[in-house]
Amino acid sequence: MNYRELDFTTESDVEQKFLYKLLTSDKPYGLNYDDTNILTKPDIRKIKIDKGTTSKYYFPDYVLINHGLPSLIVEAKNPNEDLVEAYREARLYANEINSSFPNKINPCIYIIASNGKQLIAGHWDTETPLFNLKQENYNISDEAFSVLINDFSNEKIDSEIDNIKKKYRGESKFIKPRYMLGGKSSRNISRGENSFGINLALEFKYLFNPETENEREEVIKNAYVESKRRLAHVLPIDRLIRNVITPSKNESLEISNTKAPKEIFNQLKQKDKIKNQICLLIGSVGSGKSTFIDYLHKIALPKDLTASTFWLSVNLNLAPINKEKIYSWFSESAIETLKSKNPQIDFNELSFIKKVFHKEIKAKSSVLGLLGEGSTEYNKELYNIIKSLKDDNETFLKALIQYLFINKNILPIIVLDNCDKRTRDEQLLMFDVANYIKNNFNVMVVLPLRETTFDLYKNEPPLDTVIKDLVFRIDPPLLVNVIKKRIEYALRELSENQKDFNYSLSNGLIVKCKSEDVSNYLKSILHTLFQNDFFRKLMIGLTGRNIRKGLEIFLEFCKSGHLSEDEILKMRTSQNSYEVPNHLITRILLRGKREYYDESSSRIKNIFSSDTGDTLPDPFIRLSILHWLKERQRVPGPTKVKGYHKTIDLEKYLISIGHLQKTVKREIEFLLFENCIISESQDSKYDSDNLISITSSGIILLELLNNIDYLATVSEDTFFRNIEKSQIIANNMTGKSRFSPMSKQASLNNADTLLKYLKNYKNEFWFTPEPTLAVNDKFISSSLTKGLGIIQRSKTNDPTYIDVEILKSNHPIDSIQEGLIVSIQHYGIFVELGLNATGLIHISNLEGIDFLEHYEVGDRIDVRILELNEQKGKFSLALDE
């Protein structure tokens, strides 16, 4: 990089040709900053600098971010302008930024000003620059330039800002409330699974998780749920989730009713048109594409199409992800599947093989004729020909298809099943396989594909080669309808079999119950699913359009160890009307198999999770990621698909509002892995060039910010800097506080403690570069404030809740207050001080007074506040002297 030969005529030349390259080039030619660490003028807010008549609004050309904080101010000037004033203004700007931070926290350390021909640089609080370089000095061989590169480099300043944060953190130790319960065995207590639910899941495994072809066929025959284009009476949460990803409606044909898919029937009737073509079935993961295909060819097809087509499924779960191997693997797998579908045929019998390769053998007849039919030489040559043909799987498969189907005017339809479970690149490879099949075999290929992959790549090779009339889109049925249908099927099975059902109690006793008891149990949970808005919201939010995942969660709920023997008995004997209590639903879905909440074992993640390995833990990063994506859910991204935006844009924004770059990357990967966000590559690997979007699970996490049960639960697994606050929550978890464990009051107290701590932490420890931002992100603060408002209203409306902080505030120790006598006992006088505030003047503080004669209930007296028993929420009082 030769800066000395650059020609500067304008300020823009200085910015783009010199300063930007100086900032972003690798050492020793530049300061090694990443583009995401650089704020430019559109991102920077003007600040009023200077005083009196010289005051004005000003902003520099660049602000550099290190460790989430503004650290370096860079000002560019016209080549003919003097730099002294530019340097002074940049220093004033840095001073204004530093003044917005706590005492002795001055992150904006360095200043650079340049007009191209000259560069001056130094500290924000020193008028005399450390460096004053001419253009001829801009070379790595120049000592002063090399020192500048070293002292102002990204790594050097990053280390200085990190040290500032470390000093501010001091000796702070962060701890989770559940870590205060004892060792691993204490905090990781397992609730396991209930015996009733386990036996039920085993009994109906074939129904909720069909694995074999026969099991899948039984489900589609007895419990298939169609998906219709327009569904009446859809609740807002269903509508929200169904619209998280909007498929490209102009590029595919939506199946109006999957029970009678006339759109596909019309295409299948045109055999000559669809032979050697690919039919795409577009839908979300777990939306029922495989189930629909099974239903289509086994149940729904009209008789004429059943007779004129043959359906062959190849399971791509078993396919090697290798271009060199996958094509031969397909031919071999298809042959094996054909054999299993035609058990009446001996595929090794010579007469059958001769018929299959009749055309090929006939082509060799001139050679065979010379040997004399039936001779040893003839048979040997025939053997070599047949073996050569049969050993070539592609040739063998082609011949089988021709003999078994084409010669009989039957169209083979090959279904490449389970392609959509793979990543984007693997799905596109499977599409190449589909192209290979349709080009080399006389078949139609059906390829289920994720709608995300199709929407993002429909206009690019290889997807742009698909005939648009053969691209069909399927929406999943409503989850509640699927579960209801499966349970109804299970209940019919129970009714027909009339067999007893056994399960074991915690004491080892075996309980026998009748089939109607199982029916009542399933119906109670189903009743809960339909009637309880919270359960429904969580279920649908967690599963989104993934019906398969929804069935898994439903089974987990049935088996939960949090469902006690008493609860199971209530459901067994409820006559179908019992509904699982809301607090128990929350416990099951949030805590999973654990007694206490542990994010690693729960499907619902902690939006306030942080890592104590960071200099200052960041409990707001997940909130910022999800909020940014949620705000852009309806905004088209670079590929014009709504909701899909560049990871690098998100990363740059997050760094600009104070999040650490390594934390950003780590948490984006975490949210990808947990399916709270999704990338175009559809894996959990961080890639700044990827497009990403929020999922229904991410949306539900944001909505849970207003749910007290959620906030209370995740507080158990959140890092607190304040051990006292952590201890409050730990005491509520174990019953050592004034609240009983898992009570509504304990939940209110935990949620309140969490949000107040986070609000405090944000103000004191989570420094942001907000003074420099053109648009400030207020979502974190507003979310905490809104949540605290909800909690406060709930506390006010709960007559049994005692708010210690309010009691302390309204009734300070040593203050004199008027109270009302509400009870007189032989051991003292009970006094009411106000709403939910009572205290006792103990007999020991009434010496020399005949209080039983002197006072009556209803008298008003002045008392002194001695102390507050926080666990009981009661004051110790004395008479005012």
Image (tube, grey):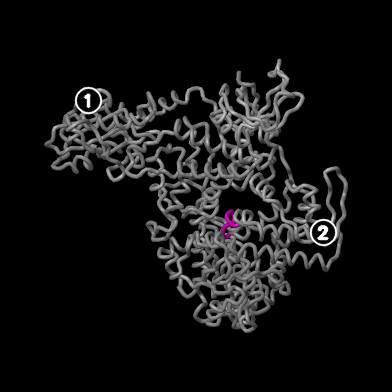
Which quarter shows the N terminus? top left
- The answer to whether 422 is drawn above or below residue 255 in the figure is above
- Earlier along the polypeptide chain: callout 2 or callout 1? 1
Prevailing SS of the magenta stretch:
helix
- The answer to whether 464 is drawn above or below residue 804 in the figure is below
Q: In screen coordinates, is 186 left or right of 256?
A: right
Residue 234 placement (x, y as % from top left):
57, 66
Point out which mark residue 517 bears.
2
Residue 541 part of the magenta-drawn span:
yes
Q: In screen coordinates, is 255 left or right of 744?
A: left
Q: Is residue 273 visible?
A: yes
Task: Return the residue at label 1.
Answer: 131
Q: In screen coordinates, is 299 left or right of 545?
A: right
Q: Give me the residue at 62% from left, 23% from top.
A: 867
Residue 641 placement (x, y as % from top left):
42, 60
Residue 10 placement (x, y as % from top left):
15, 43
Mark 2 to mark 1 CA distance (whole Å)? 85 Å
Q: Give me the residue at 55% from left, 65% from top.
A: 448
Numbered circles on residues, count: 2
Residue 604 part of the magenta-drawn span:
no
Find the magenta span and give its range: 540-545
Viewer-side residue, 579 vs 873: 873
Point out which mark residue 297 bears.
none
Residue 240 placement (x, y as % from top left):
52, 60
> Which of the two marks, 2 or 1, is nearer to us in this view?
2
Helix, strand or loop at label 1? It is strand
Q: Residues within 10 Å of mark 1 (few under 14, many from 20)?
A: some
Helix, strand or loop at label 2? It is helix
Which quarter shows the C terminus? top right
Instruction: Please name the amino acid that badge 2 sits on.
Output: Asp
Of all residues, the one furthest to the front in this rendering is 854
